[in-house]
Image (spheres, rainbow, N blue to C red):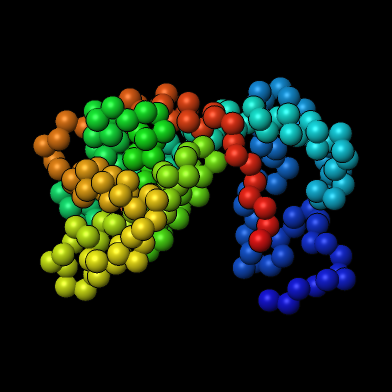
């Protein structure tokens, strides 16, 4: 693709470019805000460059409300959509594995954060299997401790330790991380709540049970945007 640095911005009325490029059928429709009677930015604001400081201030206020309402809800929906997914090969699918892990943590006296970390630890397992630890760690980074963040990022390497008969996995690869302050915590977490939560007979709580806990964690003050690096 060539980047046209001096060409006019591709803003127009959304006509069909050719028969090969259909419209999405949503032309001239405006997505509702929460609450729906709130005023949108004017139609003339076709690019973000055109927003005034006042526009941004209003948006910032609105977005606080938006995240309060939507962040936990959409995180839960990401999990809920996996409910009837096929199994990865174990007797239960990733959805039930996640709920089972969270139930175990809850029964062990885990606090809100610990329960939510377990519930979402494999949220990216299907869409990015080889780096799904980074997926959940990033999703929860602003609301959890450094210890749980590190555990989420690295839990898959620690799970390898429980696959010592696997023909290709390096089961001892966690040794590269030994000495890290969160090594023992992560090893223990995976041994108790991850390698164990593949059972059909376990009395697992439903997703609805965890909903208020998820809302509480996502409504903690965010640690904020990372600085560019
Ligand atoms: Fe995992
Ligand atoms: Fe897992």
In the figure, residue 55 lies in which quadrant?
Answer: top right
In this view of the protein, which residue sits in the foreground, 66 or 150? 150
Count of numbered badges drawn on the protein? 0
Horizontal relation, residue 136 to residue 50: left or right: left
In the figure, residue 219 lies in which quadrant?
Answer: top right
Q: Residue furthest front?
A: 179
Residue at image x 71%, y 60%?
16
Q: Residue furthest bottom?
A: 2
Q: Position of residue 205 (x, y in %)?
A: 25, 29
Residue at image x 21%, y 32%?
204
Q: Is residue 52 above or below residue 132?
A: above
Q: Position of residue 45 (x, y in %)?
A: 84, 44
Q: Is residue 29 above or below residue 208?
A: below
Q: Is residue 48 above or below residue 162?
A: above
Horizontal relation, residue 112 to residue 105: left or right: right
Image quarter (top left, top right, bottom left or bottom right) of the N terminus: bottom right
Image quarter (top left, top right, bottom left or bottom right) of the C terminus: bottom right
Q: Is residue 215 above or below residue 139?
A: above
Residue at image x 18%, y 61%?
163
In this view of the protein, which residue sits in the foreground, 126 or 197? 197
Residue at image x 42%, y 44%?
147
Looking at the image, can residue 91 be seen? yes
Looking at the image, can residue 127 be seen? no
In this view of the protein, which residue sits in the foreground, 226 or 82? 226
Q: Position of residue 185 (x, y in %)?
A: 32, 46
Q: Position of residue 154 (x, y in %)?
A: 38, 56
């Amino acid at each position: 693709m060539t980047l046209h640095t001096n060409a006019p911005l591709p803003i127009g009325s959304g006509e069909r470019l050719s028969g090969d490029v259909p419209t999405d059928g949503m032309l001239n429709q405006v997505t509702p805000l929460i609450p729906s009677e709130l005023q949108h930015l004017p139609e003339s604001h076709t690019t973000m460059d055109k927003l005034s400081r006042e526009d941004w201030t209003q948006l910032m206020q609105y977005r606080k409300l938006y995240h309060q309402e939507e962040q936990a809800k959409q995180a839960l929906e990401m999990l809920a959509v996996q409910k009837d997914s096929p199994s990865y090969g174990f007797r239960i699918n990733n959805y039930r594995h996640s709920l089972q892990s969270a139930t175990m943590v809850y029964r062990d006296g885990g606090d809100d954060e610990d329960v939510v970390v377990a519930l979402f630890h494999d949220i990216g397992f299907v869409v990015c299997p080889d780096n799904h630890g980074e997926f959940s760690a990033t999703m929860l980074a602003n609301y959890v401790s450094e210890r749980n963040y590190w555990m989420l990022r690295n839990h898959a390497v620690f799970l390898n330790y429980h696959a010592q008969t696997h023909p290709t996995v390096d089961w001892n690869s966690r040794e590269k991380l030994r000495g890290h302050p969160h090594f023992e915590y992560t090893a223990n977490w995976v041994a108790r709540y991850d390698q164990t939560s593949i059972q059909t007979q376990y009395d697992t709580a439903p997703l609805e049970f965890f909903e208020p806990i998820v809302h509480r964690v996502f409504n903690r003050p965010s640690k904020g945007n990372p600085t560019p690096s």
